[in-house]
Amino acid sequence: MPLRRAFGAIKHYSTTRTPFVHIPKSNVYRFGDPNNASPIFHDLSWTVHEHEAWAVIGSGSGEKVTLFETLLGHLRITPAPPPPGGLFPVLIEAGRDSYGSLALVSFGNRRRASGGAFYDFSARYGAVREEDRITLRQSMFPETIPPEFPELEFLKEDEERPKGMSEEDRAAFDKLIEQVGLRHLLDLPIIALSNGQTRRARIVKAVLRKPELLLLDEPLTGLDVQNRPTLLEILRTLHAAKAPRVILGLRTQDPVPEWITHVAFVDGNKVVVGPKDDVLPQITHVDLRGDLSSFTVQSAPSNEGRLLVDMQNVKVKYGPREVLKDINWQIRQGERWHLQGSGKTTLLALLTGEHPQSYTQRHLHLHGRPRSRLPTPQIHSLTGLLSPELFDAFPRHAGMRVWDAVGTGFDGGYVPLGKESVGLGVLQPVSEAEIAWRVSRCWEVLEALGPAAWSTDASQGASSVRALTEEFSKRAFVDLSVGEQRMVLLMRALVGRAPLVLLDEVWSGMGEGMVRAARRYLREGGVGPEQGVVVITHWEEEVPWSTEEGVRRFRIDSGVGRVE
């Protein structure tokens, strides 16, 4: 079945003269802002026609999503797009509910349902509770469960049974789920899926809702190289068929797909729009390869360091499905590694001791001891971690300051404890000298990775840097932008100088200045020769060090790992 016919017949509401999106020269404000407030976007003028394919590119943290929120009606446009067409002329002409016809899928934000408290993200690695056995089909596609198998449904109290799908919709679903490579995973526990697999499922779920416009923020983040072309081709086909129309949100360092014809570049409170070939030359890209030479590597990786990780014939299985097979890998102090491939999230959970099957391995040694003899809290104190799971799980209650969040990195916990909120110590109480060192380290990473490091104003004096840093340290973590939260959690991962540092999709959601500041710090002493670092990413250019500087690669293919 062609996708043009998928999920119902495609309606051509109007001629190409009528724009799909129309924002005249307007300012954009938050609802409730006073008349004299500075606009979020100044003189925004944006028109999208049916025959065009758009990408929104953001130079800073959260800028893409802010423009998407403008389309979703979450912000005030002044003057408002004129009647009768308003913001979405094509939909208004067709008598459609314009805002109800839009869907946003963002991969840079925390799941809304998670609330403000910490939740145990390690539960995804082992089905220890009934709800952990929920399959991908039960969780995201319950409408595909045959009515003759009601026992497969997992309904919450007072929740109605989902309606089934029409024959046409089911055929289209089957085709799409096959194209994104998820058919064989539908009846596996959702906690066993990788980040990339879960993200592809979220896109399918959004398409199932039949929106007229699908806004996809950073769809390529966390997606392996083999699946990127397939997903982009699917999105191109859906957009061409208007089933649904698609607008992509990309980072400045992301490649722009060939089928994209127009770009909206968000730079602060200005949005530059136009044909791709006209706008792209105006964008200063974060050249993740080219900027390596501008920073000095403080210390070269060593092959003589103490052994931090020793894996021999490590395996992970979920029933008959083998996720990892005979993994053999050693990580030493001073080494810099690039981890790639399907199964990397599971392997990361073994390194942090969070996977239940880490206890049952015949030879999994962490920090010189068998994992089974090493308490999990001690492993956390010896590991600096930033990952999508930790980002989603980290508590965001109102009382958590930036300083508190950074201070939890010393002991690897999630609640600020102890004097100066820098922890109590894991195996033994911290001394006054240790507390003083921890406080000093907090200020060091806050200055190196805080707002003073993102500023383009080179004239900042020492006093203004400290004032800006102190102000930032007192801000509520929950009130920060996505990029700022990720920077704070990077500070948390680095503050304790843990022997093992694990950085998974570290640049996701960060603005251009943040990326440069973080790469500079990592290369110029943010991690030392006594530390081993593993960067987990599908993008080779996101690794802060080059192969010429000693970076080694560990790749997993079909569950089998190898050193390259």
Image (cartoon, rainbow, N blue to C red):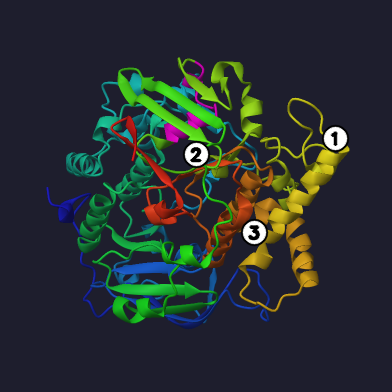
Q: Is residue 347 above or below residue 521?
A: above
Please tell me which of labels 3 and 1 falls first in the chain.
1
Q: Where is residue 503 shown, x and y percent of the image? A: 52, 45
Q: Amino acid at mark 2?
A: Asn
Residue at the disc numbered 3: 449
Q: Where is residue 281 shown, x and y percent of the image? A: 37, 79
Crowdedness of circle 1 by 10 Å Cα count: few (<14), some, many (20+)?
few
Task: Please give left or right for residue 421 compared with residue 450 in the image.
Answer: right
Residue 303 numbered mark, or none: 2
Total marks in image: 3
Q: Is residue 148 above or below residue 510?
A: above
Residue 431 numbered mark, or none: 1
Between residue 478 and residue 256, name the one nearer to us: 256
Q: Amino acid at mark 1?
A: Ser
Residue at the far front: name it. 304
Please tell me which of labels 2 and 1 falls first in the chain.
2
Please tell me which of labels 3 and 2 falls first in the chain.
2
**Marks 3/2: CA–CA distance:** 29 Å
Between residue 201 and residue 370, name the one nearer to us: 370
Q: Under tag 1, what secondary structure? A: loop
Dots 2, 1 in contact, CB < 8 A: no
Task: Please give left or right for residue 203 compared with residue 504 in the image.
Answer: left
**Does the magenta-highlighted stretch encompass residue 377?**
no
**Image: magenta residue range:** 345-359
